Image (cartoon, rainbow, N blue to C red):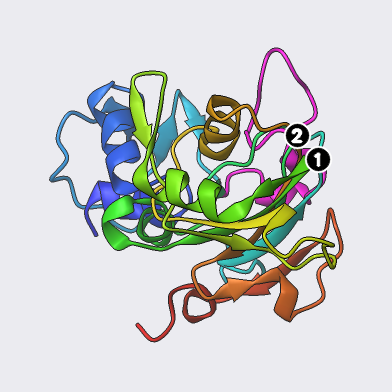
Amino acid sequence: MRINAFLAKIGLGSRRKVEELVLAGRIRVNGKILDELSYKVLEGDEILLDDKPIPEVSKSSLPEIIAFHKPAGFLTSHEDKHHEDTIFKLLPKEFERYNYAGRLDLDSRGLLILSSNGDFIQKVSHPKHKVDKEYIISLKSPVDWKRIAEEFKLGVREGGETLRALEVKPANVVSEKDPNKTAYLSIILKEGKKRQIRRMCKAKDLVLLDLYRVRIGKLDLRNFSLPESKYKEINAVDVLGEL
């Protein structure tokens, strides 16, 4: 198995990310800094990251993929010098090397997918694979949802980027007095740029009270029980459908 495939398999990141580790000289094999991506891992090889052993994830004892229900107030990050409360404080230590598919910012909550398989994370995260994500947002005041839907799908300019939603519709969280206005919207994204929904709302002067991701691909929090701060083992088909 080539070094990039091996490192991705044991949970160090996508193949692109682990290739960057090799090219940066951070991987040692049998005492020597690895300088070629074509190296094939052999049984008994001693592989170090930053001169420290890499504990291989045991597939017999740990699930390869998990769904996690993130609460607000925790960062989707392995570590952050400005904020110590990350999602990994809520997960067993054995998952600390897992990578995640798509961040949720500090104040957002909902579905996250984590895995020790870097290739799977890449399939879920990269826009070319077209895995959509659905969010329920709560606004301070009801809006003309058809107008917002048209503007969000057409594209909102913010920070030098055009941000678009694939679909926008009422979330039907509660019954509204005026069917043409609602404070609860379902927004589906295909790509998901950094803080995209918050930026779109800000550009349209919409005050966002809550952002809750309910679905990634085929996996929908509304279809199974998963309390906040808890995780559940899943498989690739649950997210991507028939492979």
Which comes sooner in the sequence, label 1 or label 2? Answer: 1
The answer to the question of whether label 1 and label 2 lie on touching residues, with beta carbons closer than 8 A, is yes
Quadrant (top left, top right, bottom left, bottom right) of the C terminus: bottom left
Q: Position of residue 163 (x, y in %)?
A: 40, 37
- The residue under label 1 is which amino acid type? Ala
Q: Secondary structure at mark 1?
A: loop
Res. 216 in view: yes
Toward the viewer: 216 or 51? Answer: 216
In magenta segment, residue 85: yes
> Is most of the magenta stretch helix, strand or loop?
loop
Residue ID at (67%, 72%):
233
The residue where tag 1 is placed is: 72
Q: Position of residue 116 (x, y in %)?
A: 52, 56
In magenta segment, residue 240: no
50 relative to 219, above or below: above
Please tell me in which quadrant of the rendered image residue 124 appears: bottom left
Residue ID at (44%, 43%):
151
Q: Which residues are magenta?
A: 75-98
Toward the viewer: 198 or 128? Answer: 198
- On residue 107, which mark appears? 2
Toward the viewer: 169 or 39? Answer: 169
Residue ID at (58%, 44%):
97
Q: 173 left or right of 37?
A: right
Q: Position of residue 171 (x, y in %)?
A: 69, 64
Q: Secondary structure at mark 2?
A: loop
Please tell me in which quadrant of the rendered image residue 198 appears: top right
